[in-house]
Image: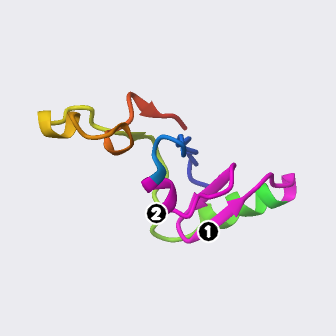
Amino acid sequence: MPDISVYEINIDRYRRLARAFGILVVPTLVAGGRTLAGLPTPSDLQNFVLQASSEDGICFGELSLNENTSENHQESSKEESAPEGHLFA
């Protein structure tokens, strides 16, 4: 079984990203074409992880966003700028 990473996204700060992935309920897990929203039971969570990890073409790992942006991008809103640091697994 591959290593599985879970990323936390501040949906208040990154609204566009949250909308793009359909994250309207907290917590929401997204893996490939699968979504699990709300507070899952242990069984729901286990099934989600097993199904997501068995899909072909899904890459799990740590996501690091580049913080080097041009001056134009730095002047944009906080919502549109890259998050500080890493999104942790």
- Is 57 in the magenta? no
Q: Is residue 11 left or right of residue 29?
A: left
Q: Nearest the camera: 10 or 59?
A: 10
* Label 1, residues with CA under 10 Å away: few <14, some 14-19, many ≥20: few
Q: Are marks 1 and 2 in contact (CB under 8 Å)?
A: no
At label 1, the amino acid type is Arg
* Structural crowding at the residue carrying mark 2, measured as other residues with C-alpha within 10 Å and reported as few (<14), some (14–19) or many (≥20): few
State the image coordinates of residue 42 (x, y, percent, origin top left).
85, 52
> Magenta includes 29?
yes
> Residue 84 sits in which quadrant?
top left
Q: Secondary structure at mark 1?
A: strand
Numbered label attached to residue 2: none
Viewer-nearest residue: 56 or 44 = 44
Residue most extreme to the left: 71
> Tag 2 or tag 1, which sits nearer the N-term?
2
The residue beneath circle 2 is 20
Where residue 49 appears, as percent x and y from the top left, is 68, 57
User: Which stretch did the figure color magenta?
Assistant: 16-43
- Residue 55 on image: x %, y %: 56, 70
Image vertical order of residue 77 relative to residue 45, above or below:
above
Disc sitting over residue 34 in the figure: 1
